[in-house]
Image: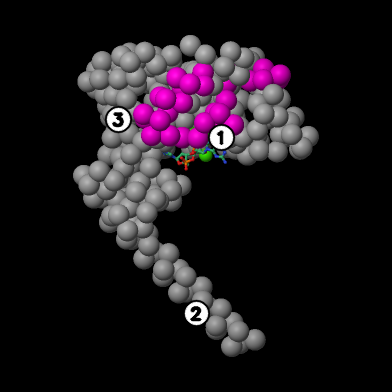
Amino acid sequence: AKLEGRGRWCFYSADMVNRSARQLQLEAALRRAEERDELALVYQPQICLHSGRLVGMEALIRWKHPELGMISPAEFIPLAESSGQILSIGAWVMRTAVHQMKQWIDEGLPSNVVAVNLSAVQFRDPGLPELVQKVLDDAGLPPSCLELELTESVAAHNPAEAGQMMDRLHALGVRLSIDDFGTGFSSLSHLKRFPIHTLKIDQSFVRDISTDPDDRAIVQAIIQMARALRLTTIAEGVETDEQAAFLQSHGCEAAQGYRFCKPLPPEEAQAWVQIHTRP
Ligand code: C2E
Ligand code: CA
Ligand code: CA
Ligand code: CA
């Protein structure tokens, strides 16, 4: 038993060393990724479930490391958050997405809303509203064309401060949405008080909507509550016709997911919209 225990210790210890070595390697590489043009945005169309029209495009970051290949944002965003680099990456994301939407509007895209994910670290930066204003001014994009996606966790540890930041952003005229809604135990009183436009129903509730009565009940409850609070709803991770039909029949406004379109580089996303959505 002792031997086995020791063997196991060696195994875990090597694994931990490897993991932190990869983290260190990625952190160092990420610092150069921006200037080396290794970062890119892909866009996922958001579709109105009633009209089939495009209601927005969510920007999602991609990193192609020269040797390691594609690194998931789920892996490198937390690293960028702990190193502080998320502030410059986040600013790059916002600038790029806002300029892209300005170009799309000029080319006649049938929706003018681009949604950008904000890290909690960005959200706590007092300079965020100035940055948003500057990015919009530089691109000549109206503020109503930008939606900022926040997770419930940003409000969790200091609701008063989070509320003030939301008020400042709302005052600029941008829209706020709550991402991964339902996973973070949002207090309903926050929802009522905060200037939020959209709830994004987390894909974990959508996944088994066709088979799991609990998930159906949760999704119905979220949609009804959103309506009562005059918020719109977008379902994430919609992969099947059945899921889309359930959501539509229960009053969910919009959806995004592989059922419609996966996240694509800008030209391909634009081409998809032209072929698949109503004008
Ligand atoms: P998220 O904001 O909740 O984004 C949804 C994720 O679900 C994306 O993964 C998207 O590619 C994926 N997805 C879309 N449709 C479907 C579907 O039908 N089925 C399934 N199974 N998945 C689908 P992705 O692009 O890997 O991003 C993962 C997370 O990384 C995002 O979750 C977001 O939290 C974060 N992230 C991505 N881009 C950015 C960014 O620019 N800034 C920040 N701060 N975070 C980002
Ligand atoms: Ca999101
Ligand atoms: Ca989400
Ligand atoms: Ca998520």
- Between the C-alphas of marks 1 and 3, the distance is 24 Å
* Crowd around label 2: few <14 · some 14–19 · many ≥20 (10 Å): few
Report the span colored magenta: 248-277
Where is residue 20? Give x, y as percent: 39, 64
Q: Is residue 38 above or below residue 197?
A: below
- Residue 130 in view in this figure: no
- Between the C-alphas of marks 3 and 2, the distance is 46 Å
The residue that mark 3 highlights is 96
- Residue 4 in view in this figure: yes
Mark 1 or mark 3: whose residue is earlier in sequence? 3
What is the three-letter code of the residue carrying label 3?
Answer: Thr
What is the three-letter code of the residue carrying label 2?
Answer: Cys
Instruction: Pick whichever, 188 or 42, lies toward us.
Output: 42
Q: Secondary structure at mark 3?
A: helix
Q: Is residue 261 magenta?
A: yes
Which residue: 38% across, 42% down? 62
Which residue: 57% across, 21% down? 254
Q: Is residue 205 magenta?
A: no
Where is residue 227? Give x, y as percent: 63, 15
| In contact (CB < 8 Å): disc 2 and disc 1 | no
What is the three-letter code of the residue carrying label 1?
Answer: Tyr
- Give me the disc on residue 258: 1
Task: Confirm if mark 1 falls within 8 A of ligand 1.
Answer: yes
Left or right of 247? Residue 125 is left
The residue that mark 2 highlights is 10
Which residue: 69% across, 24% down? 245
Mark 2 or mark 1: whose residue is earlier in sequence? 2
